[in-house]
Structures are given as structure tokens and as C-alpha cells.
Amino acid sequence: MEKKGLISDMSQQMLRIVERVRGGFQLDSHINITQLSRSTVWRSNLEKFEAMQILDRNHTAAVMLTPDAFRALIQYIEAIEEELENTQIEMLLKAREDMNNWETDEELSRKAKDSFLSRQEHLRGLLDGDRK
Amino acid sequence: MAIGNEFILEWIDKVAKVSGLQMDPVTLADDVLLMAVVFDDEISFQQAMDSVVRALDQLVQGKVAASELVSNYNGWDSYHFQSQRTKGHRADLRVIFQNITADFTQVKGFGHRHLPA
């Protein structure tokens, strides 16, 4: 049993890459789409910045990432999701701390149905109302 | 179209009838309702609840490997599984539980991992 992918577990290098990508695009980090296959100058810039804008007639048509940068971003997203989920579970456990009327089978079914029906008005409101 | 009461009651019953499962009745009602809020059409609701019942059944019977669980929530474990049976579907649901004895499993809650409650 293990918790994986926490931000604290991400290597320093991966985190630095994420920061570089987030740090915004710097002056030289763009390449015109027509130059992509024609020259190799952009390669060293990409290595330096991890991400570059691809321009098509002066507007940004796309963003290009190194494979490492892409992997680092995905890992970062997963680590954040993991921490968020851990927090949500802790909150749920806290909220349900005193709900310990453990029942099974027929008793559980009957009491749960009663619980639903007795709060029906309020609960149906959640189902039927305020729908986005 | 919102899920009707008859489906909610039907699935409350099916979850309760999973052999060896213990749950607080109020939380059971809450969690089935929340599933109906998230899966708000009948077909996906039925499929998702079916997945929940299957997952609960496997947990109670001890058919889930420890390596598949996320642990250390003050003694409670979390099991993640998918709501739809399509291959490669994201594990978007979870059950929070603990195995009390060989015969009984206590379930603190189940539901969608990301959509708000």
C-alpha cells in the first residue's frame, strides 16, 4: 500500500522543469512554423527553455514542449490531484467521524431507505434543483 | 432527467445486501444520492452503481490485492475503480473502508473521486 506521486516526491529536477515552463515565455523562445523543418537553431533554444511558441504569421499557433517538460507537467498534475484527494478524504473522515451506526443487510437497507425518505424534500432538491 | 426515487431506493437496497458489508445507514443514503447527483442519467447511474456493488463485493471477499489500495487515512483504506466497464476507463470512483474481521468490512463512504459532493 503506497501513496504515490506526491509533490514532495517529485525530483528537484522535474520541479525545476515545471517552473521553467510556467515561468512564461522568454524573448527568444519562439519559432516560426516555416522555419521548423528548415533550420536547427531552435533546437538549442528549446533545450534551454523547455517550451517554445510556434508562430504562424505572428500569432501563436501552438506550443511545443520537450518530452521531459511534458512528462514533468503530467507528473505535477498527478501529484496535485493526489494531494487534493488526500485532503478530501481526510475531510470526509472528519465529517463522518461520529457516524458509526454500523448496520448490515436488511436493517441497513430499511434504515437507509427511511433516512432517504425522511429527508426527501431536501435531498430531491439537490437532484432536481440548481442544475447547471 | 434527474434520477427517480425508485432507482435510489433500489440501489440503497442492493448495496446494503452485499454480504459482509457494514455501513452507517445515513451515510449509505447520502452516498447513493450523491452518485445520482453526479451520474444524472439513468443508464450511467445504473452502470456506476453496479460498479460500486461489484467493488464492494470484491473488497468484502478479500479479492483486492493490498497493492491496489491507498492506505493511511487513520486506519482507513481507499480503493479506486472505474464507473464504466469500458477498457482503460479512468478509475473515477473510490470506496473508503476497513476490514474489521474476516467476515465484515466497514464502509465509511463511496463516490466519485473528483466531482464535488
Image (cartoon, helix red, strand yellow):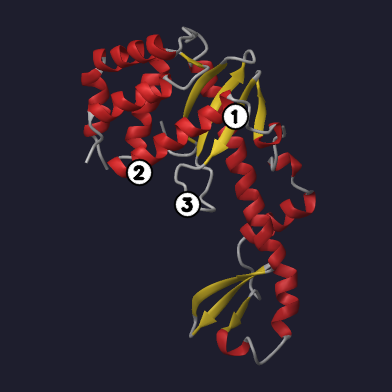
* Chain of the residue displaying label 1: B
Measure how far apart labels 1 and 2 are at the Cα level. 23 Å
Is there one chain holding both mark 1 and mark 2?
Answer: yes
As helix, strand or loop, the secondary structure at mark 2 comes to helix
What's the amino acid at mark 2?
Ser
Could you classify mark 2 by the number of other residues whose Cα lies within 10 Å: few (under 14), some (14-19), or many (20 or more)?
Answer: some
Q: Is residue A42 above or below residue B41?
A: below
* Chain of the residue displaying label 2: B
Q: Quadrant of residue B58?
A: top right
What's the amino acid at mark 1?
Ser
Q: Farthest right residue?
A: A12
Could you classify mark 1 by the number of other residues whose Cα lies within 10 Å: few (under 14), some (14-19), or many (20 or more)?
Answer: many
Measure how far apart labels 1 and 3 are at the Cα level. 22 Å
Q: Going 60% across and 14% down the picture, which residue do you hit?
A: B103
Q: Is residue B54 above or below residue B24?
A: below
**Residue B37, percent across and down?**
33, 34
Residue under circle 2? B44
Residue under circle 3? B86
Asked whether residue A65 is in view, the answer is: yes
Asked whether residue A88 is in view, the answer is: no
State which quarter of the image contains the N terminus of chain B: top left
State which quarter of the image contains the C terminus of chain B: top left
Q: Going 52% across and 20% down the picture, which residue do you hit?
A: B107
What's the amino acid at mark 3?
Thr
Q: Could you tell me how many numbered marks the image carries?
A: 3
Q: Quadrant of residue B13?
A: top left
Q: Going 69% across and 90% down the picture, which residue do you hit?
A: A39
Residue under circle 1? B78
Labels 1 and 3: the sequence-earlier one: 1
Disc 1 to disc 3: CB gap under 8 Å: no
Measure how far apart labels 2 and 3 are at the Cα level. 12 Å
